[in-house]
Image (spheres, coloured by chain):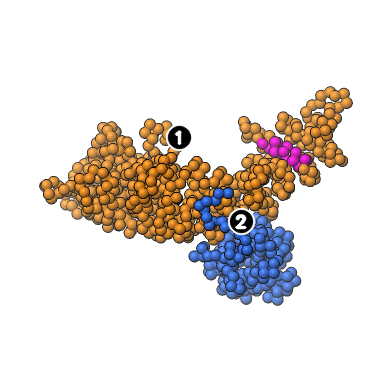
Chain colours: A orange, B blue
Amino acid sequence: MDFFSRSYKGLLGEKGQPQSVEDTVAKLVDRASSSTLLEDRRAAILGLKGLSREYRQEVGEKGIGALLHILNEDRADIDTAKAVLEILNILCTPDRQDSATDVAIKFTDEIVQNSANINLFLDILQEYDFYVRFHDIQLLGTLLAIRPDHVQDCVLTAPMGISRLMDLLGDRREIIRNGKLNILWSKGLLLLISLTENNADIQKIVAFENAFEKLLEIITEEDGLNGGIIVQDCLHLILNLLRYNVSNQNFFRETSCIQKIPPLLNFSAEYQHQGFDLEFLTQDWHEQKIANTIVLLELIKILVVPNNMNTVTNQNVMIQCGVLKTVIELSLSSNAPSIVKSHSLYALADLIRGNQNGQEYLAKTVVPVPHPSQSSENDAKSSSYDQILIPPRPAVMSLIVVAVGAEYLESYSTRAAATYAFESYTFNNINAQLVLASTLTPPPDDNPNSEIIIAKPQSAGSLLLSALLEWEDSEADPYVVWFASVIFSHILMNNERSKEYARGIFFGDGDDNGEENITLLHTIAGNLMIATRQNAERQNADVRVLIGYLCTLCIWLWDSPISVREFLSESGHLQMLITSITQSSGVDARVQGLCAFLLGICYEFNHNLDPQITKSTLQQILLNRIGYDQFVNRITRLRESPHFKHASQYLQVNNSIINYFNEAARGLPELYFDYAFVEFFKNNYGKIIKCWISQNS
Amino acid sequence: MSTNYTYDYIIKYIIIGDTGVGKSCLLLQFTDRRFQPAHDLTIGVEFGARFVDVEGKKIKLQIWDTAGQESFRSITRSYYRGAAGALLVYDITRRETFDHLLIWLEDARQHSNSNTTIMLIGNKSDLESKRAVSYAEGEAFAQQHGLFFMETSAKTADNVEESFVDTAKDIYEKIKQGVFDVSNESNGIKVGGHLQPKTLPLNTDNGNNCC
């Protein structure tokens, strides 16, 4: 420090009188750039460094150009290089408050406007000295945070730029034993993460430099998802490289990286095609592992985004190499926490959506049934495996169980995800619809006196129906009915044969004691009527139940004249629709809109099969008791209602703050409409509005 | 599906040359065996892959097809160093694409590995009637600069297979002679698992990695 004090004293002038900061800075800058001796220049730089924190503006305004020049010339001198990089970093780091007008922005702009500067910093990454590299990486990170586009462009045009950065992720086995190198390594990784954000060209070059392979190797060495935050960062970087980047996705697939996913999830290869891996199903879930797993599931989803060009190819590879099986078991049989299961179920949904192989795979998969106590976190390991495993059941049935909460209650987002996965299973899959519809009839009951529901033999369909009709408890959990109605709608959607099966379902002992058998359609409509009345009286029927039932009926009656006839055969049903539509207050606008839509469907698909209620009967009712304008208004109000307009495409539970405050007391999500129904409605409401007119004219 | 296929070597290629000479079409013909007359302009860089067989060795070619437009030049340079093979393409019906070869070659020599095998390709040989660069001229240029040479047609697939495979043959020859340091992947070559003399088992036992 001798040279430091020597030169600083020298600046104080002969008589030792204090100077202004400006003068001091100017003198130091002058010495730093024009002294002949390296030692003098270095001393002046260190002097500037001492002032830079307190007098950022002065040092920056006078010195930035000189500093960059000196770095270029004197970078071989470690102390100089270190100090200059440190000063530049101080100059460009904004104070917390008021960052928009901070001088740091100005200084950053000054540096990044010349790409030679960035090239210089990239070159310096090769230096040997730890602190030089440390401050260099730090500085690049600071600049990148303020002017990402500029820095990204500069890095792109430097031919060796990315290579230098990738060199930072060198041989990890060497690095791990060296604390200092380890710090550089992690900093380099974070720098690459921000550098690859939203820049496809940089993403491709990084991938070209073997990033996938390197990163996956590191993750494996770090004990996969059981590993620490480094694993999360590596996965994050991979995610950045793949997101919206088809070329890199192809590269990822073609270099067999997809095959490395199941082992990362701790899924043993020997169970890839058959059997259950108990170790996989009962893991310890610590917080970092949860975070790691969620990023990995996100990665899977990025490769199978619905309707992307490569999705089907990627799906097929994932089905073939065991990713699908891994995800199915993680979702439906493991002791993973609810948040992991919900991400896993969304991944499962996208893995099979629009892919016949995937749908068939799911159809024939059986999964172990988790024991109820399994879903709570800590006692996972303690419960015995036998209880979890026996007996395995179809995965599709497990999806329904999770969605309607038939055995144990998962979070709403997990149940929504299970429902969405079910939608993906029936999407463009007539066979799956039919198979499920055929299971709506309950299997023969061995022991009619048994009181335990689980002990009764259940089929996927019968389980679904009991949830669908259990609306009395809806105040506590309206989503039993709501999710069940979404699932049931997807079994019926655009499939007359499924509807035919459903029309064949009836309840009651019928013939034996003279009571009338009640069909399923009438049971749903009957439930709707009672629930509507109770909802109006502010009793225990949640509006979601009404919406769920009405949407189901709309899907069921659409394009199905026989179903329409059956619905209208009970005069109370029509009366209920008219009453709901015409009430001027006290009825939810969405319910009124759905009633109007359903009435329109009854008209449009009324083929006069029942002489009692023909098309013209309905038309008279509309004109005389409701009025055409009111009818149209009801439908329009539904279409414009916020929950309808903003229905989540992937049936995601919206955890917004507003929602949190609004419904905090009950903790209910704001899911009212299934996106598939919204689409169906949007495609058809025009027709329903116009059909009355065309008949008129 | 080629995805599970094991390989003996992975070799990285780049394809360079002026815009519109048919680089993407050559790649498509090679990887998918089809021709797409109205191919979109390549933006930045695109990736393709295929297996070839050289002397009984399974070689996976990873090919980066670069944009020919000047504005992408600075980006595509980043790919030179990591490639073991380069296909330098011109269009035999457009003289200027031939005239620009020197610029491309300088660029490649400056930024790539000195061992990179470069194959000069005169594409669109099906358009004989519009030819503007003779075969002899192409051949002479290649000889002068120590390049391999071939005329191809991405449309009829003529010589497309050969151009990629012959480049691979030359690289394989260099590997056998020990010209490439195959332990350093940044040279554009990766050796398959079973050919590597000493490797640490990576994915075999996930159960207990204790250290």
Q: Name the one closer to the observer, B16 or A501.
A: A501
Coordinates of residue A275 in the picture (x, y in percent)? 40, 56
Q: Relative to A630, is B181 above or below?
A: below
> Pointer 2: what residue?
A210
Callout 2 secondary element: loop
Residue at 50% from the left image edge and 52% from the top image edge: B207
Coordinates of residue A233 in the picture (x, y in percent)? 57, 46
Q: Relative to A330, is A409 above or below?
A: above
A513 displayed left or right of A192: left
Q: Could you tell me which quadrant the N terminus of chain A lies in?
A: top right
What is the spatial separation of the Cα atoms under label 1 and label 2, in whole angstroms? 42 Å
What secondary structure is the stretch in magenta mostly built from?
Answer: helix
Please, which chain is the residue tagged with disc 2 on?
A
| Amino acid type at image mark 2 | Asn
Residue A80 lies within the magenta run: yes
B144 displayed left or right of A686: right
